[in-house]
Structure formats: structure tokens, C-alpha cells
Image (cartoon, rainbow, N blue to C red):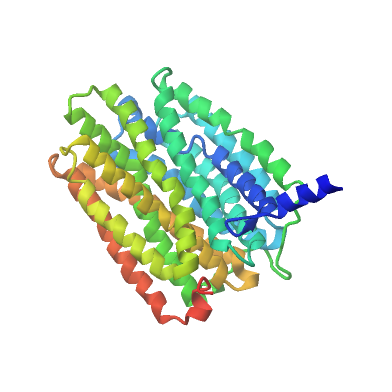
């Protein structure tokens, strides 16, 4: 009897405002996303080699990466609204399988820009059915308290997976050809299918009564939702420019120091992954900050920091290595820290029967920003003078941060009780 009481006491103990049972569930949910995304940055790690092998310019290389986000964005308009009718469980489990299969096929089948883009688009289609429904499940479970922390933790695992994917793929390429390294990462992501089934097999999905499961654009009448969606789109554009092109900038910096191309590629993937690891703790920190200070204000301050890094880092190719890596670490944190803020805020301001549709538009508009960003940056790289291309590209990224701050100011004119649910 005393043993049972001790176990019950342990499970009821609170950590970070959550009881241990809830925290364990949250970590398992987040780990499923983490494992699914093992191959997420394998393409970026191998990008200089793939460019040379396939004869791609920077715009084409950016487009292949963006195909993943395009698949995510377009399918969000169909998949995410279905959670209002069907609940999130079935979609979550099915889509882990779809994304894993596409990631495994990439190194086996892709041999040009077209085939690579198709497979990455399918992988993105699968991710949308995991990331968004998963975020909704987490937000619903922690609706009473700690929502910002919980959603931030889920998103933090998304960012951690990017760092792990980039670093491990880079390390694997020291022993294997890029296709084999990519295949190992893709095969490992298959564990997410089993995790999803085990975690949610007893989960009872919530659905909205009377929902058709189709996209309802009337969700956009909500001014607060529109502001957060716009902020998320600018955030995604900045985020994916950095994810695709910062490792390439590091390659250029290492080559300028006398490294050969392969050593520079492996070194940049490793250094970039480790630098981006600072972003792994960003979303949960941003979520906690926004729980205390409000979503819009917190997002604006974080954008100011990432914008400052953008204006600096592109001009630092010839700077001492430790200084460049230091700025990259701060940059990695700043581009990630506000990620959970917009998604959390959207679940708070959306009407209950339109959460799925609101999140669908949120994902579509947001990730279209992510689609355009790397292509836009690649185009700047292609047309800029060699000596100025990195500075001009990342300075243009800094302008996105300034625009986002101006957009978020609109939130300050909306009633905080209605629109900024974080102020409690």
C-alpha cells in the first residue's frame, strides 16, 4: 500500500508546472516528431555535393529544399481541416508512414531536380499530418495551464531534430557516400511509425461537432489570427533561409581558410548542426517567455535579435572562426525561439469549431514563406558579385525581421483579452 502511495506521489509531482505523468507523455509525443525528422536536413548536409553531381545552380538547389515545404503547405489546406471532423489520431499515425517512405526513397530514386522535388514534396505532405495535429493534441491536453511551455517543448524537438539530422548526416558522410548516409537517416526515422501507434493507440481524438472537415476560409475574418499568421510566414522565410544557406556560408568560410571541398562540406555540416543546436532550446524558452510577457511583444523582441544577426553574419566569411561560430550560435537560437509563439497564439484566438481551418491557413501561409525564402536567397546568391553575395543575401534576410516587427505591432492595437490569450 505504501509502495503504491509512493508511486502515485511520484507521478503527481510537478516539474515545470506539469505533473510527471503529463511531462512523460509530452516527451514521448515530442520524441515521435524528433525521430520522424532524422532525415530532415540530410539534403542540406549533402547540398554542395548534390549540386556538383546534378549540375544545379543555387536557385534550383533552393527549390528542391523548398519542395518539402511546398508539399507541407499545400497539403495543410486539406489534411489539417480534417482534424476538426476526424480528430488528430488517425491522421498522425498515417502520415508518419507517408513521410518515412518518401524519405527512404529519396537516396534510392532521386537523380535530378524533378525527381528530388517530387519525393521531398511527398515527405512534406506527410510531415503536415504529424506536426500540426500533434501540436493541436498537445495544445488541447495542456489548455488549462502551461500551454506555451508544452507547445514550445513539442516544437523544440522539431528544432533539435534539425541539428541532429545535419550533424549526424555530416558525420556519416565521413564514412559513407551521401546516398548511403541519407538512407541510414531515413531508415532510422521509421521508428516514428511504431512510436506514433504505441503512444496514441488509446488516445481519444477531439473533433468539432458539426464540422465538415473542409477548409473554412471564414477563419480569416479573425484579425488576431491574421496578424499571427503573417508573423509566422515571415518567421518561416527567415528560418529556412538560414537552415539552407548558413551551412553553405560556413563551407565558403572554411574553403577561404584553405580547406578542401569535402572537408569543408563535412566540417560545415558538423559546425552548423552544433551551432543550430542552440535553437533546440529556443522554442520552449520562447514559449515560457510569451506565457509571461505576451505573444506579440515576445515575438517582436526575438525578431529584433535575429534581424541583427542577419545583418552581421553575411559579412563575416573572412572573420576569425570562433567569432563566426559564436554569432551562428546566437542566430540559431533567435530564429527558433519565436516558433512556438505563433502556433500557440493561433490555437488561442481561433474559434473552437474553426481551429483546424485556422491552423491550416496558418500552416499554408507560414510555410509558403518558407518555400519562397530559400529560393529568394538562392536567386540573390546567383546574381550578386562573388565578393558581396553572402552579405547581400543575409542582409535581405534581416529586412524580413524588420517587416515582421512592424506586422506584430498591429497586435498591440487588438484587445489583449481577445487576441493575446497568453496574458493571464
Note whether residue 337 is visible.
yes
Point 57% across, 39% down: residue: 36
Q: Nearer the viewer, residue 53 or 421?
A: 421
Q: Is residue 82 left or right of residue 159?
A: right
Point 37% across, 50% down: residue: 333
Q: Is residue 52 left or right of residue 149?
A: left
Q: Which quadrant of the structure image shows residue 352?
A: bottom right
Point 39% across, 28% down: residue: 170
Q: Is residue 127 left or right of residue 365?
A: right
- Looking at this view, name the residue that lies furthest to the right: 1
Percent coordinates x, y for residue 363 in the rendering: 50, 58
Vertical placement of residue 220 versus 178, above or below:
below
Q: Is residue 382 left or right of residue 343?
A: left
Vertical placement of residue 410 versus 155, above or below:
below
Percent coordinates x, y for residue 22 in the rendering: 67, 53
Percent coordinates x, y for residue 168 in the rendering: 45, 29
Amino acid at each position: 500500500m505504501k509502495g503504491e502511495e509512493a508511486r502515485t506521489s511520484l507521478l503527481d509531482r510537478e516539474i515545470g508546472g506539469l505533473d510527471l505523468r503529463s511531462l512523460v507523455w509530452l516527451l514521448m509525443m515530442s520524441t515521435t516528431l524528433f525521430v520522424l525528422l532524422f532525415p530532415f536536413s540530410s539534403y542540406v548536409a549533402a547540398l554542395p555535393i548534390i549540386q556538383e553531381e546534378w549540375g544545379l545552380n543555387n536557385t534550383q538547389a533552393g527549390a528542391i529544399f523548398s519542395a518539402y515545404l511546398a508539399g507541407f503547405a499545400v497539403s495543410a489546406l486539406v489534411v489539417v481541416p480534417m482534424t476538426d471532423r476526424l480528430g488528430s489520431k488517425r491522421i498522425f499515425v498515417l502520415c508518419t508512414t507517408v513521410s518515412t517512405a518518401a524519405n527512404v526513397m529519396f537516396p534510392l530514386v532521386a537523380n535530378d531536380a524533378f525527381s528530388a522535388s517530387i519525393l521531398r514534396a511527398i515527405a512534406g505532405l506527410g510531415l503536415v499530418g504529424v506536426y500540426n495535429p500533434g501540436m493541436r493534441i498537445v495544445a488541447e491536453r495542456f489548455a488549462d495551464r502551461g500551454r506555451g511551455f508544452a507547445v514550445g517543448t513539442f516544437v523544440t524537438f522539431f528544432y533539435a531534430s534539425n541539428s541532429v539530422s545535419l550533424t549526424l548526416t555530416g558525420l556519416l558522410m565521413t564514412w559513407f557516400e551521401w546516398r548511403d548516409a541519407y538512407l541510414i537517416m531515413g531508415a532510422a526515422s521509421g521508428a516514428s511509425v511504431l512510436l506514433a501507434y504505441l503512444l496514441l493507440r488509446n488516445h481519444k481524438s477531439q473533433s468539432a461537432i458539426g464540422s465538415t472537415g473542409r477548409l473554412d476560409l471564414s477563419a480569416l475574418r479573425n484579425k488576431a489570427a491574421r496578424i499571427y499568421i503573417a508573423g509566422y510566414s515571415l518567421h518561416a522565410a527567415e528560418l529556412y533561409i538560414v537552415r539552407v544557406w548558413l551551412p553553405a556560408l560556413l563551407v565558403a568560410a572554411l574553403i577561404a581558410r584553405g580547406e578542401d571541398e569535402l572537408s569543408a562540406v563535412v566540417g560545415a555540416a558538423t559546425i552548423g548542426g552544433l551551432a543550430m543546436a542552440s535553437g533546440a532550446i529556443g522554442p520552449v524558452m520562447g514559449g515560457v517567455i510569451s506565457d509571461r510577457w505576451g505573444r506579440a511583444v515576445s515575438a517582436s523582441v526575438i525578431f529584433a535579435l535575429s534581424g541583427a544577426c542577419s545583418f552581421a553574419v553575411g559579412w563575416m566569411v573572412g572573420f576569425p572562426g570562433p567569432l563566426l561560430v559564436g554569432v551562428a550560435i546566437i542566430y540559431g537560437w533567435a530564429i527558433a525561439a519565436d516558433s512556438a509563439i505563433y502556433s500557440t497564439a493561433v490555437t488561442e484566438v481561433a474559434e473552437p469549431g474553426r481551429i483546424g481551418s485556422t491552423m491550416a491557413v496558418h500552416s499554408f501561409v507560414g510555410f509558403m514563406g518558407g518555400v519562397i525564402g530559400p529560393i529568394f536567397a538562392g536567386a540573390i546568391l546567383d546574381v550578386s558579385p562573388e565578393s558581396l553575395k553572402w552579405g547581400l543575401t543575409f542582409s535581405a534576410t534581416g529586412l524580413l525581421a524588420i517587416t515582421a516587427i512592424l506586422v506584430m505591432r498591429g497586435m498591440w492595437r487588438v484587445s489583449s483579452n481577445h487576441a493575446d490569450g497568453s496574458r493571464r
